[in-house]
Amino acid sequence: MSGSGISHHKDVEFLEECNPALVERNAAEFRRLRDLLVQVTEPARRAETRTEWHSDGSHTYTSRLAEARQLVEHIAEGYDKAASALHAYAAALTTAKSHYSNGKRSERALASLIGTKGTAITRTAQEAEPMCQWEDMRATTGVMDFFAEITMDVDDIRDEANRLHDEAGGDFHLAKAAEGEARSVCVHALKQAYELLPEFKTRGGGAPPDLYAAMADMRREAEEARANPLTHLPGSGPKRDMTGPVGPNTLISPELRDIRMQVAGLPEADDNYWDPPENDKEKAEWISHNKEILRAAARRSGLPEELVAGIAWKEIAGGYGWFDNGADFLRRAADETPLSPITAKNLPNRFGGEIDETSFGPIAIQLRRGAEVLGYDPENLTDRQQKVVQGALQDPKQNAFIAAGFLAQIKAETGCANVPADQLTEAQMQEIAARYNGGPYWQSKKGQDYGNEFVENLGKVKEAMR
């Protein structure tokens, strides 16, 4: 039950997945497009005002130039408004995530305090967040949720638990308010920006013609413009067509379809599903056999090949593929059996964890992350889509491309987002590797050890890639 100024973890848990750096990166992309269009407006103005042409058709020429210039100016204004909106939202997200972190800190302290009085034994209690557990304990309404609650005296922790409960709830409320208000303003501004963009329609409602593919002169101009820094953000990979969000009725996402087309012409992969490498010699053989696949995956995502291959070196000996399938089966069985007192995350040893956190493939990728890279909505993944994503992760060739895509996402979140692939330092790749392993806890000892081992293996990785 929430009081005034109190929110629960579940109200703001989506902030865990929000990344201000990626929002800022998108703002920079819109700003790049604005700057690119601004460069066009002055030549267009000169062509319109300084060209003298006297004929029956000169007025048509002048009016068409004026229309083109005004069109470019409106599009530039739209992109500028979108960039400003996203920039402001990124700043608000940073503030919201700070409040969220403070709330989680108080929540962890509350969980530890609760642990001194009882252990959750029912599914309801196990799935409840610490704030809700404490609300249940102090109200003594859920006596079956804890081993000792019938005789439990919580008075000696009541004051401290109430303080931690209110601190966590207050911080979560501040996070919710900061993000919610900023999102409302941002969405409104983005709608205004969208309205500034022209709507191009073709007769009959068919697909617009692909002028770029049809006109050799346009392709030549595009090739010459590649050197212009405004044609791409620094550090970004090759440009690909934008696709909309994938809904529940789309089985094969455009991103997955493109990956499948890319891997079709590559050599067959060395699959380690049943027999993972056990030593450096076998790892080097695996990397060498699959080097063309790893190289193509890195090139598609705008990454150094040694980064993708170095992560592969670390992951391919992680375990048998059948274990991943077993973990997935047990987690789903626990989750789909409501009468079971054990939840998926409370299964013993490595079997415990959320269903969408199960990792698959030679380069281990969580199901959730794989879905995100491929353009699916992990929160609303259908059973059929889940099987498609899992199959893609377990195919060694597709797995390499998905892993590279995930690494590119991680790079975009770091301070080296603008660094081109051939200029990434070992220290920067080490940070990306630590983030790959540790996620939001990449600065922990586990994440840092992973990054250090990645760097230690780089010499052997480069040798295997030759």
Image (spheres, helix red, strand yellow):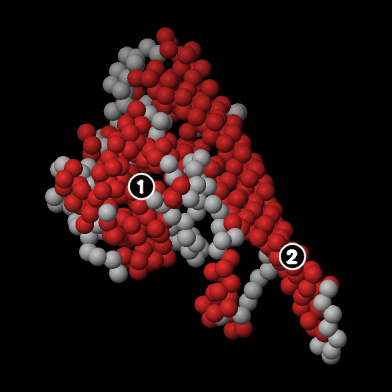
Question: In the depicted view, which residue is nearer to us: 71 or 300?
Answer: 300
Task: Name the quadrant containing residue 217.
Answer: bottom right
Residue 91 falls in image quadrant = top right
The answer, for residue 99, to whether it is visible in the render is yes
Report if the CB atoms under discs 1 and 2 are less than 8 Å apart. no
Q: Amino acid at mark 2?
A: Thr
Q: Position of residue 408 (x, y in %)?
A: 43, 50
Quarter holding residue 131: top left
Answer above or below: position of 1 versus 86: above
Residue drawn 49% across and 12% down? 159
Residue 125 visible here? no
Which residue is found at the position 83% from the left and 83% from the top? 53
Q: Which mark is residue 307?
A: 1
Residue at 62%, 83% in the rendered image: 203
**What x and y, as percent, mark residue 367?**
33, 50
Name the secondary structure under disc 1: helix
Residue 214's spot in the image, x, y percent? 53, 81
Quick one: 355 or 333, which is closer to the camera?
355
Which residue is depicted at the point 42% across and 27% down? Answer: 130
Nearest the viewer among 13 and 194 is 194
Numbered badge on residue 337: none
Please name the amino acid that badge 1 sits on. Leu
Question: In the figure, is residue 361 to the left or right of 167?
Answer: left
In the rendered image, the quadrant that contains the C terminus is bottom left
Q: Secondary structure at mark 2?
A: helix
Residue 3 in the figure: left or right of residue 359: right
Up the image or down, 13 lies above or below 408; here it is above
Q: In the visual, does 156 lie left or right of 294?
A: right
Mark 1, residues whose alpha carbon is within 10 Å: few (<14), some, or many (≥20)?
Answer: many
- Residue pointed to by mark 2: 41
Which of marks 2 and 1 precedes in the sequence? 2
